[in-house]
Image: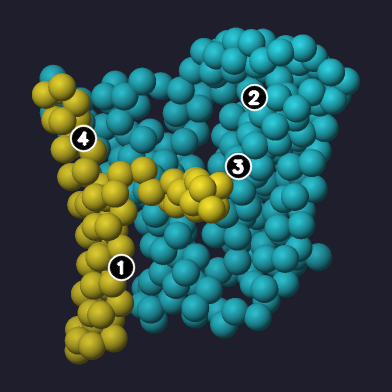
Amino acid sequence: MRRAVTLLLDAIALFVDDETLAITLLLILALAAFVENTMWAGGPLARVVLVAGSVAALVENVARAARAARRQ
Amino acid sequence: MIPALDWLHAGPVAAAAFLASAVEAVEAATIVLAAGVTRGWRSALGGAAAALAALAALVLAFGAALAAVPIAALQLAVGSLLLLFGMRWLRKAILRQAGVIDRRDEVQIYARERRALAGQGSTAPWDPAALLASFKAVLLEGIEVIVIVIGVGAGGGMLLPASAGAVAACVAVSLVALALHRPLTRVPENALKLTVGVMVSSFGLFWFGEGIGVDWLLGDATILVLIAVLLAAAFCGVWLARKAAR
């Protein structure tokens, strides 16, 4: 059981380094899918949400990580 | 045989798979080399070969399963995973480039692994410590290679060029590592990781968009635009992180 949990954690670690960034990205993907399928301006808006949202999430995350490193 | 025109689409896929797999292969080679030099080549190469066999079994199992998945669902799943995977690399590469976290040092990792392996009892013909260290390193890095190949190749029916890129990288790194008998320190790993993070994240955004039904204005060429946007974001991230860390 313990080995299975370790293996699962190793597998998750392939995709997740910083939990906040991973969760933010997943929320952006969900929002883009929602916008694309429910709003009249879905196409262009979904593209903006998907690309601009992911880029903004990344840039904000690294800036925050750098500030946190400075405080330590 | 892929028609000549399709190589225009296959090129970026093969390049992304090659670069990403090269980074993974360098990391695995460092551990296998440390195990081989410290505990004997039979066990180190045996562990690596066993891991390659396990990876081949994984590819066969997943390859058959992939064929049965509808393309939109595949693009959604692969796009999401690829974006998470690529952004993870990109984040780390940006922070390393900005000097916020230490760069990966293959020499240091090699020395640490050698120290750890040297302190583990006598060396038998089949040494369990070397076998296990090699097996684990090749298996874990190999799984990342499989994720990359499936990620960049499966969404657009480009598994063949992606696999070719990955195999070429792994063979090239293995041959150089075996010839040199020391860690590959001259590989600009962080620059490679940043490049691969940008490429893999771009494929992730593109495939996820395709999966939810987004009509990309430039078709497949949108990937190049996404690469440019993410590259600009990466440089902006490095600049911001440097500024914030001061």
Type of the residue with mark 1: Leu
Marks 2,4: beta carbons within 8 A: no
Q: CA distance from mark 2 to mark 4?
A: 29 Å
| Relative to B2, residue B32 above or below | above
Q: CA distance from mark 1 to mark 4?
A: 22 Å
Pointer 1 or 4: first along the chain: 1
On whether disc 3 and disc 2 are found on a single subunit, the reply is yes
Residue drawn 77% across the image and 34% down it: B47
| Relative to A12, residue A62 above or below | above
Label 3 environment density (alpha carbons within 10 Å; few <14, some 14–19, many ≥20): some
Label 2 environment density (alpha carbons within 10 Å; few <14, some 14–19, many ≥20): many
Residue drawn 67% across the image and 66% down it: B62
Residue behind mark 4:
A65
Q: Which chain is yellow?
A: A
**What number is the disc on residue B31?**
2
Q: CA distance from mark 3 to mark 4?
A: 27 Å
Residue B133 in the image: state x and y as whole percent: 66, 29
Q: Quadrant of residue B90?
A: top left
Outermost residue toward the front in this view: A1
Type of the residue with mark 3: Leu
Residue drawn 65% across the image and 80% down it: B68
Front residue of B218 and B189: B189
Q: Is residue A41 left or right of residue B26?
A: left
**What number is the disc on residue B140?**
3
**What number is the disc on residue B230?**
none
Q: Output the chain of dot 2.
A: B
Q: Output the chain of dot 3.
A: B
Type of the residue with mark 4: Ala
